[in-house]
């Protein structure tokens, strides 16, 4: 059985984790939104082994390849190319704790606008935008991000 796009080498984006194995589902919040490519087909074609873009993340246990059900994937027919990181600031965390302060970071940087070292987000492709309205947004970064560059 083959479904559309169920070949190796295809570019995919993880849009959901409903049908994937339990091990994958346990990391759903970190995996959804990630992009990668299909490196293998598992379980008679029902699962894709997806190799995530970027460096293996500590938050994902260092694992880069994840078995993911096709129904949880958006398959690009054409390579979507690199994600555009040019627009706006990225979110950088002061620590990996849940209540970490959210700093604004320029794409590719590990220092926040206010000069603090921040933890890079797990995968460079998976970068959340900095939101000045977030409860834990750093006030200094909010002010600096609002200034025209
Ligand atoms: Zn800051």
Image (cartoon, rainbow, N blue to C red):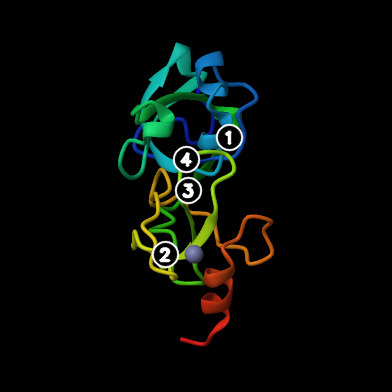
Label 3 and label 2: CA atoms lie apart by 36 Å
Image location of residue 113, percent across then percent down: 43, 70
Give the residue at mark 2: 112
Give the residue at mark 4: 96
> Helix, strand or loop at disc 1?
helix
Give the residue at mark 1: 29
Q: Residues within 10 Å of mark 2 (few under 14, many from 20)?
A: many
Sequence-first disc among 4 and 1: 1
Q: Residue at x 34, y 31 (%)?
A: 64
> Helix, strand or loop at disc 2?
loop
| Pointer 2 residue Cβ closer than 8 Å to ligand 1 | yes
Q: Can you say whether 51 is above or below 108 in the image?
A: above
Q: Residues within 10 Å of mark 4 (few under 14, many from 20)?
A: some
Image location of residue 50, percent across then percent down: 40, 31
Give the residue at mark 3: 77
| The disc label shown at residue 45, or none | none
Judging depth in this view, the residue of 9 and 127 nearest the camera is 127
Q: Residues within 10 Å of mark 3 (few under 14, many from 20)?
A: few
CB-based contact (under 8 Å), mark 4 and mark 2: no
Judging depth in this view, the residue of 117 and 122 nearest the camera is 117
Q: Residue at x 50, y 61 (%)?
A: 103
Label 4 and label 2: CA atoms lie apart by 15 Å
Label 4 and label 1: CA atoms lie apart by 14 Å
Label 1 and label 2: CA atoms lie apart by 24 Å
Image location of residue 112, percent across then percent down: 42, 64
Q: Is residue 91 visible?
A: yes
């Amino acid at each position: 059985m083959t479904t559309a796009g169920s070949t190796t080498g295809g570019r995919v984006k993880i849009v959901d984790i409903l049908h994937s194995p339990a091990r994958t589902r346990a990391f759903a919040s970190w995996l959804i939104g990630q992009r990668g490519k299909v490196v293998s087909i598992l379980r008679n074609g029902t699962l894709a082994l997806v190799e995530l873009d970027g460096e293996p993340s500590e938050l994902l246990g260092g694992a880069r390849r994840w078995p993911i059900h096709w129904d949880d994937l958006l398959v690009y027919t054409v390579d979507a190319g690199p994600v555009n990181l040019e627009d706006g600031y990225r979110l950088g965390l002061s620590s990996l704790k849940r209540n970490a302060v959210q700093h604004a970071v320029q794409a590719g940087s590990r220092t926040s606008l206010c000069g603090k070292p921040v933890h890079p987000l797990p995968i460079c492709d998976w970068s959340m935008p900095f939101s000045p309205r977030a409860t834990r947004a750093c006030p200094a970064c909010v002010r600096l991000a609002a200034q025209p560059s």
